[in-house]
Amino acid sequence: MWENKFGPHLYRKRGIYYFARRIPEDLKGHYKRDKIVLSLRTKSLKAARTRASTLAGKLDQDWLALRWKNESDPFNRFLLDHTVEAKLSSSAPTMTEAKELYVRAKREGRSITFQQAADRAVRELASLSGDKPIDTYTRTEANALRDMFLKRGLRPSSIKRTFNIIRAIVNFTTRELGLDEVRTFSAIYLGDREAEGEKKRKAIPIDVIRSVQAECRTLNDEARWLIALISNSGMRLSEAAGLVKSDLVLDSDHPHIVLKPHSWRSLKTSSSSRIVPLVGEALWAAKRAYEASTSEFLFPKYCDHDQCKANSASAALNKWLRPRAPKGCVIHSFRHSIRDRLRAVECPPDIIDRLGGWTVGGVGESYGNGYPNEVLHRWMTAVASAFAANVCF
């Protein structure tokens, strides 16, 4: 009845869209009715589909929680014997089920790489120790996963990232379902390799920045505009690659970017939403990209409505940069350099944090609207002037 041309769980009555979904047979005892019907209070099909999808996801979470509270699990007979034994001694969902709950709740506003990373982390764990209830994994199995990664030659930072994902999945699920805390994947020890692996990223020397920017002007293509923009703005690669033309304000005394999250590209922290002044090579690159793009995206090669292809961009741009910069320098190193360049012109630390989107400390920082655009622009102009006069370092 409700799976029609409008979309799953949707129907229309007198021009208004409604959400409708039947209660599963095994959960009817928890509800007063055998179906849920809610007005979505909109005549827009697009808005209705979005709201219906959100409501369906919320119901899926509620129903999963209710099922885990039941004494018996109707799915036991479909599992392998060793998994059944683990399930019988645990009321918790398996790691794959926990991942699906986590992704469904958290994926809104995230790029496709969010789900890919979660899928990859759980797949690696399941390949080694099986897909078991989240509270039945042992510390020995967690350490075995670490050892497997180390044998593959993965960097400690990559191993940490995988364990952070697994831990986030477990912690979210235990909170949502009211389960006991699971600490199996916390504080995984990486030994001396951890200290060796966590090397501080280098800043790119000023003479290298000059030569790279000059070559960007010569080649004058989309990839080089992206590098030039990053080199003189301090933006992260994903921040710049995910821009749309409407983020840019070029017809102003103080040209700038209004950096904000989009459905295809989130931002790392709340501090990452900011005004990014455009001066020097960054302004040149932004104008060239704006004029050349035939879509709403500033860098259509690296971004569309489905995703921001930051990983692909990173691989391609770093490959180009590698022979032109000292060993250990990558695209992200421009971000380290811009902080050093701001220090060199004695820019106040709190303004540096605002310009780069770094987290600022202190309760007072949450008061007011922050620095006006002209103040931020003045400091970036000072950096550009010092750069042009060759007095940065």
Image: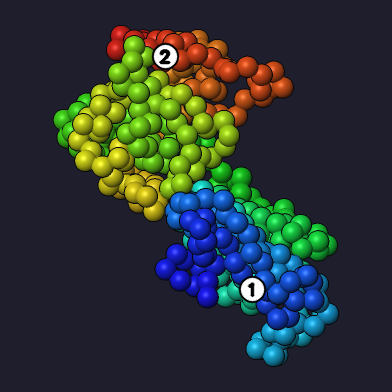
Residue 26, image x, y percentages: 73, 80
Q: Is residue 67 left or right of residue 330?
A: right
Q: For the residue labelled by badge 2, is the local secondary structure a helix, a strand or a loop?
A: helix
- Residue 40 visible at all: yes
Which mark is on residue 22?
1
- The residue at which mark 2 appears reads as 377
- Rate crowding at label 2 as few (under 14), some (14 to 19) or many (20 or more) other CA atoms within 10 Å: many
Name above or below for residue 88 compared with residue 205. below
**Residue 227: quadrant of the picture:** top left
Residue at 61% across / 45% down in the picture?
Answer: 195
* Circle 1: residue type: Arg
Residue at 45% across / 42% down in the picture?
Answer: 262
Residue at 53% across / 14% down in the picture?
Answer: 371
In this view, the residue in front, 85 or 290, is 290
Question: Which comes sooner in the sequence, label 2 or label 1?
Answer: 1
Residue at 46% across / 46% down in the picture?
Answer: 263
- Rate crowding at label 1 as few (under 14), some (14 to 19) or many (20 or more) other CA atoms within 10 Å: few
Q: Is residue 272 left or right of residue 243?
A: right
